[in-house]
Amino acid sequence: MTVPRQSVHVDSPTERRNPRTTEIDRMSTLDILRTINSEDQLVPTAVAAALPHLSRAVDMATEALQSGHRVHYVGAGTSGRLATLDAAELTPTYNVPAEWFLVHHAGGPSALREAVEGAEDDESEGAAEMRRDARPGDFVLGLTASGRTPYVLGALAEAHRIGASTALVSNNPDAARAPGVDLVIAVDTGPEAISGSTRMKAGTAQKILLTTFSTAVMVKMGRTYSNLMVSMRATNAKLRGRSLRILREATGSGQQECSAALLAAHGDLKVAMVHLLSGVDVMDAARALAESSGHVRRALGLLGAHAF
């Protein structure tokens, strides 16, 4: 039987006492809130410093998806819950196939609501999940405030051995690079307002990084046109109305013309958009999109059309 390796967080900045909040239990309610808010305002600057490394992760993930592979998120506790949330929102927002983004959370689905004791310390379980689900060419992104969570590091090491590319998001810039980690994205959010409560600044930073990462990947995968969501599927009245508004915004055409285009395109917003912007029929618009991997601007370029 494999004995789980115990995670050690003593030296992580997130575990240290914050000298700015030592009197927090003596403060008024408003001052407690102001103090926490002051700490939260440090997060965007810490994230900004990590963007060059995050950019490399976006390119690694995009390359994996473009070549028919997948992206995996691996986390425990707050990190795993945030990863689960980010992946869950990509399908309704960008209509991505469910298999594009897979989430591995220490302790499994039950740990999303309640802590599963010892799950994050089980290095072998993280490795086992990668042996089951990861493939050569995939991209695996681990998230851990301490930079040392055994479940996450075990998964990254095994994924790397299998032939996946790997990156680690950490809130501990002092953590040594673990075996099997191709890229470290360190976000120095410092000590928490409440020592060790990594659902605070560390969690906020990881939430920002995840949404920034996945949104950038979606843009590079052609799931947007300009800053518009054009890959969504209109499955109800609200979304059909949104599709119509997006089409009018993108093309400058009137409501009746856009409604007719969506009908001709069987509700496919991208096809309707390329049809209206280029003047070709919907079949040629669909063909151009297929040849350009679903990128509206590239499809318009193939057709010699002007993109707004």
Image (tube, rainbow, N blue to C red):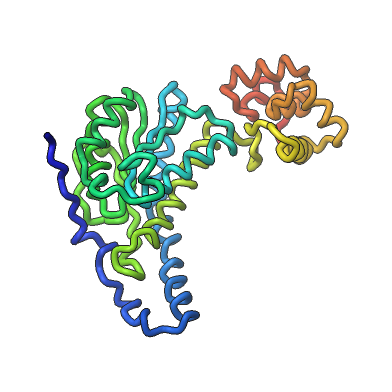
Q: As drawn, is 2 to the left or to the right of 68?
A: left
Q: Which is more toward the observer, 228 or 307?
A: 228
In which quadrant of the rendered image does the N terminus lie? top left
Quarter of the image where one finds residue 22: bottom left
| 128 is higher (above) or lower (below) than 245 | above
Question: x, y percentage for residue 120?
Answer: 26, 46
Q: As drawn, is 195 to the left or to the right of 301?
A: left
| 306 is higher (above) or lower (below) than 28 | above
Residue 52 appears in the figure = yes
Q: As drawn, is 149 to the left or to the right of 201?
A: left
Quarter of the image where one finds residue 244: top right
Question: x, y percentage for residue 180?
Answer: 22, 36
Quarter of the image where one finds residue 36: bottom left
Question: x, y percentage for residue 32?
Answer: 44, 77
Q: Residue at x 73, y 40 (%)?
A: 238
Q: Residue at x 43, y 76 (%)?
A: 35
Q: Residue at x 78, y 17 (%)?
A: 281
Question: x, y percentage for residue 308?
Answer: 72, 37
| 249 is higher (above) or lower (below) than 197 | above
Q: How many numbered callouts?
A: 0
Q: As drawn, is 88 to the left or to the right of 195?
A: right
Q: Residue at x 48, y 43 (%)?
A: 86
Residue 74 appears in the figure = no
